[in-house]
Amino acid sequence: MDKGGRRIGREMFHILFPAFFLYLALDGGGWRLFPKTVAIVVVSGAYLLWVNREKLVFSKLFIPLLILLGYSFFSIFVSVNPSSTVEQFLNYFGYFLIYILLFNYTRETGKLRELLRFSVLFSLPVVVIGYLFYIQNMLGLIVTSHDMPGYFIGTFYWKNPMAGYLLFVIPISFFLYLTEEKKLWRYVEFIVAVLSLVGFVLTRSRGGWVSLAAASIMGLLVYLRLGYRRKDLRRVAVLLVVSAALVPLFIAPRMIVKQASSLKEVSRVEQVRSFEERKLMGDMALRVFSDFKLFGVGLGGFESVYPSYLKSSSYLSTNVHNQYLQAAAEGGIVGLLLFILMIISILWGVFRSCFIISDEKKYLTLAVFMSTLAFSLHIMFDFSFSFSALSYLFFGLAGATAGSVPYSEKKLKPPVVTLLAVLSVLVTIASTLALTADTSFREAREYLRKRNLLFAKSKLSLAVMLNPLNADYRIEKANYLSTIGKDNEALSQLNVAENLSPFSPAVHLVRSRIYEKKDSLEQAIRSLERAISLAPFSRPDQYNKLAYLYAKAGREKEAKKTYEEALRKFSSRPDEKYSQQTVSFRYYIAQTHLALADILNEEGKYHEAEEHRKLGELLGKPRKEDILAAKLGFDTYTPEYTVATIFSAISRLDTTALDTLLLEKKSLTWMMNGEDSVRVLRIVNVDYDILSSFSDVIYILRWYHKDGSFEDSLGQMRFTLRGGRWRGIFNE
């Protein structure tokens, strides 16, 4: 590389990486596969740019992270979900690269302050967006679909990871402000520190508060050991007084907003529920660890096994909310010890820098130590480590700080540097292929929904070819093959999928449908029994299906027991609080009660049958109020109640009402004849994702004809969230 290129590379890294951190934070915290892939591409590209012009030094601090990286690769071969473990390996490779890269960058250039300055500056858009969301919610102006607007959520759309982000911003901006000599930068750092501290309070993240408090106590002890500076006291007092004065401005007005009392109650209930949920998830992780003590279920594998370890249907989550327990469940005792060793090594590399550096830069290393320590504590309370914006901040800033210490390290030999370069290219290619496969898979599912089988076939084939380790791709391909009559090929795909992901109930659900279609009733029953045993609290509809198969096979007693078992495992309370994932349970259980009522009628137990029938009809009626929508600031009824409202308007020939309820109504012209009437008899299923503004409702209609007769039919309608209300779509 020429001298100009060397200079640009040297000058721009302290801006490039803060901009990179900002991108990840703006993209939902880097939760999805796309930003994670971009992260690997950026870090690998930066590494190649660096080694093209400079040599790398090796530090003993790299060893624990390198060993954990190697273990993540080994974990692929013992994983219950190899595809997820490969993704974790790619992530750890990115963490390793950014750590050694910024370690070498600050070691050579000494630009730790510049890196931290721009990291703080580029955090400002995230913090400002957090205030925009919060203020809009205060004023009742939120009509967009994002989660938890009653808290300070920033671009993470969730209070706890936003608190995790601010754990980095607050200490660093604080100490930059205390030690800054340039006036303009001092103003910027003061503003960011105040806004971040106030926002941190508004997150109301108890885990975040505890983590920052503990790190602050440790930081104060180190600060006193480094040397008390009298001038810091005045600046600290100003910062804290301004922050304390601003907090009431954002909390007090909420008390006079008309929804304030309900929001306060929701907050209280959510805190209790949050604690109970964490206990549940922690217990699950410990039980998984007990069953897979040595190597765990594979990094990223907890998501695959958690349905088998659920004890109730009240909460469904794929994260433990404690990274150390998740490391134990996924990595076993070996993985847990390596993870803890890596964390200790990262913290030690930063901590020792505080006492080796003699100038004012030692206070900046203290800031990073407090940030990394607070984050290491915070991941005991939440799954912030899963957000790549936070993980890359953790490893990047820790590496930059550890590298700023002036001590001798061994230079890596050219073959090792070349090997890392080759691996970075291979990892980049693998990440890109995984992203392409995931995109093709999503497109294939959309084509299947629209019955465009030709395009679905090509997209599914591409997804399986690019990521042959993903069981979900093969299960969907089996679905497709069964649809076109290639049942034997479908079963072959399912056999491969089962080997890849032995805890997947979906494998056995699809296999059961195929055997049922082939009139292999006993095989269909065994497959469905296996699916339910793998996820006993996840799919109440499968109990109904199994009972139906039992009855079809003449095993009426087992059918009745299956219905009764479903009622024991899933709530029949009409006032049950459902999440997006569990709202369909209400309508499945309604069908369970109605089916059981029919069986009891045949047995002559009329009174008991009538009780089940009444409860089934009650549960089958569409819910009216959507508690989740109310929490998010939407003034709308549930999608299923909107279905009932639409058909009521059709019976009345009320086109004005339909204009507000539908986005498109061309297909309704044949219904509106003025002679028949129709109503929604029962909701069969509802699937909705309020964050994606999507819902899909299946229902039973009862048509009342002019001659007094009636008939029932099954219908389905899609919805989208527009203007804060669900709007129906008959045709797309």
Image: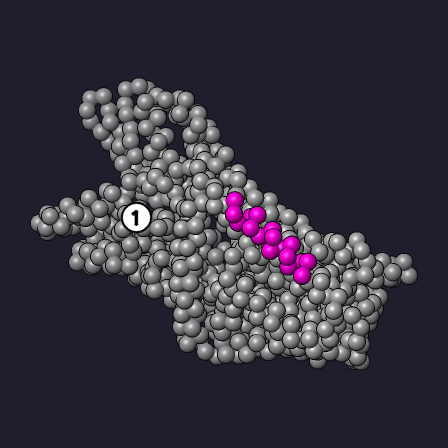
The percent position of residue 336, horizontal first and vertical second, equals: 53, 76
- For image coordinates 19% across by 56% down, the residue present is 560
Name the residue carrying label 1.
575
Residue 250 located within the stretch drawn in magenta: yes
Which quadrant would the N terminus be assigned to in this image? bottom right
The percent position of residue 126, horizontal first and vertical second, equals: 64, 51
Dividing the picture into quarters, in which one does residue 561 lie? Answer: bottom left
Q: In screen coordinates, is 83 left or right of 543?
A: right
Assign the magenta stretch its main secondary structure.
Answer: helix
Query: In this picture, is 422 found above or below 668?
Result: below
Dividing the picture into quarters, in which one does residue 410 lie? Answer: bottom right
Mark 1: amino acid: Asp
Q: In screen coordinates, is 610 left or right of 636?
A: left
- For image coordinates 54% across by 72% down, the residue present is 75
Q: Which residues are magenta?
A: 237-253
Q: Is residue 431 visible in the rendered structure shown here?
A: no
Residue extending farthest to the left is: 604
- For image coordinates 58% across by 57% down, the residue present is 200
Element marked by disc 1: loop
Query: In this picture, is 242 found above or below 668?
Result: below
Q: In screen coordinates, is 426 left or right of 199?
A: right
